[in-house]
Amino acid sequence: MNIDNDSVDAIRELINIGVGRAAGLLNEMTGTHIHLKVPEVRILRYSDLTRESHILDHDHLSAVTLRFEGSFSGISMLVFPPESAAILITALTGEKIEAPDLDALRVETLNEVGNIVNNAVMGSITNVLHERLTYSMPTYHEGSIGEILNTGKGGRYEWVILAISQFNISDLHVVGNILMIFEIGSLDSLLRKLHDCAGSAG
Amino acid sequence: MNISSSPPLAEYLDILPVGIIVLSSDYAVVSWNRTISEWTGIPAEEIIGRDIRERFPHLRDKRYALRIQQVFEGGPAALFSTQFHPHFIPAPLPDGALRYQKTSVHSLHAGGKSYAIFFIDDVTELVTQVHAFRKMKDRAYAEIEERKRKEEALALANRKNNLLSSITRHDLLNQIMALKFYIELMREEKDPAVISEILQKEESLAGIIEHQVNFARDYQEMGIHAPAWQQVNGCIERARASLPTKGVEIIMDLDSLEIYADPLLEKVFYNLIDNALNYGGSNMTAIWVSSEKTPEGLVLSLEDNGTGIEAKDREHLFTRGFGKHTGLGLFLIREILSITEIGIREAGSPGKGARFEILVPEGKFRYARE
């Protein structure tokens, strides 16, 4: 599959638009000033994922996932090492605790934060493409990346858009990953649609 | 099951133990199930067909509207957590408190129209339990921290005690050796004048030994009991009561200041005031005790208007053996304070008075609640 620089640039821009919207919403909701940056967007093979991102090479990740199906299918997720997730949530909620951990309520809060980010990124892409997808219920998972993706069905995933995301709240910097993992043929379909869209706009 | 003979959808929704609302894309209520009706006290017939925002205007807010709009447009479900939206549709409990809720909003397309379906869970019980668990955990964590702090302080005091007991033993042996030497001299001496002189020296040595034994007793107390919060006013009052102040005023401006220190803290103030009374000179009239917050913590000052301390002496002031007497008092003060990481320095002006500054780090001082 041919992944040219223009395609990567277009995806980067769409992710940045989505992430910007998510940050705006989180600011409104929490009353804290959150700056959400995506310093790096890469497209890589699913089999290279953990090798390419040390954040994902971890047995115990916290992830908020959203499955989508349609003209392109896969799973979008916001992933953190669990300590980072707990620190982020306590900062967002303004809690002052000595040792942040993820209890049932904080997991639910993280699920909402992930839901906002995933929805904003997916919305940004589908709006531009005028595409309608079917979504599953957003869910929270813990485990290795393989466990989260239930890779018993391992062969179905092919390409991944990896967006390193950085949440800055006051002096706190928490790094997580936005992942869009595509089933076989799906990234190709997305890139073709982006290309068509750019062509018709031009 | 024959679908044509099934009860209408509203009847299914009514038996579910969650609040369910269906809105059309203009925010008009299409369905309002029995649970949400019971929670809010609003019967379905009163709200169906009406814009939900008339009754719940907060839903106009961007925090809700943007995300609900995305659902109407066929986007993914929107989740509203208890933390950020505890009362999505305010619903009181019998005691008047509001139910805690967890809400999800889903897209629904039927008959060419867009709807949003809201599922609202009452999670009051879960929230209460999690909050109780968090409190319990915070308390346990604070107790562990307190215990750790005490153990560290006790271990430090133990190390200091071991070190000092070996030094004291060494010093005592030196004095005893000197005493034995004078006893031997006395045995051979016939001249009463010389014998009287030797006796004086022996008495002086006995005095030093007695003082060292007393000091060792005080020092031995250090670190035996865990550090604790102590009211500074009270410590100084008790020290003053056991000292002959001879008309020297002690003026305190400390509010309800408390310091986390070894229980020998009172000894610190006793020794500092005793030093001022002994070496401040006959013109000294007052000792002022005050405190000031600084970026590093708190400075607690004891200042007098006596003769002061020479600048060259400052460096060795707290060293064991330095001073006009045995040099144990200021050394002991520094050791007691250091158990809980409190420092001390002399910052007065020679000729104008001594000023001892006790440097208390953050977390080791507080003001007692009224």
Image: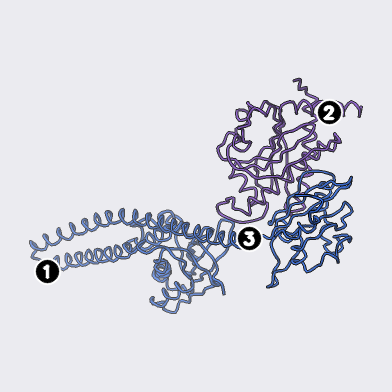
Chain colours: A purple, B blue
Residues flagged by tags 3 and 1 on a common chain: yes
Q: Is residue B70 above or below residue B268?
A: above
Pinpoint the chain carrying mark 1. B
Give how far across and how far down residue A37 sits, in percent: 73, 39
* Three-letter code for the amino acid on which mark 1 is drawn: Pro
Give how far across and how far down residue A24 sits, in percent: 78, 47
Label 1: how many Cα within 10 Å (few below 14, some 14–19, many 20+): few
Residues flagged by tags 1 and 2 on a common chain: no
Gap in angstroms between the C-alphas marked 3 and 1: 91 Å
Name the element at disc 2: helix
From the viewer's perspective, is B35 left or right of B355? right
On the question of residue B359 being in view, the answer is no
Query: Mark 3 = which residue?
Result: B127
Observer-side mark, 1 or 2, equals: 2
Q: Which mark is residue B192?
A: 1
The tag earlier along the polypeptide, 3 or 1, is 3
Query: Mark 2 = which residue?
Result: A193
* Three-letter code for the amino acid on which mark 2 is drawn: Lys
Name the element at disc 1: helix
> B359 or A123, which is in the foreground?
A123
* Three-letter code for the amino acid on which mark 3 is drawn: Val
**Most distant residue in the top direction:** A2
**What's the residue at 21%, 56% (across, down)?**
B173
Observer-side mark, 3 or 1, equals: 3
From the viewer's perspective, is B370 left or right of B310? right
> A150 or A11, which is in the foreground?
A150
Pinpoint the chain carrying mark 2. A
Gap in angstroms between the C-alphas marked 1 and 2: 120 Å
Give how far across and how far down residue B367 sits, in percent: 55, 68
Label 2: how many Cα within 10 Å (few below 14, some 14–19, many 20+): some
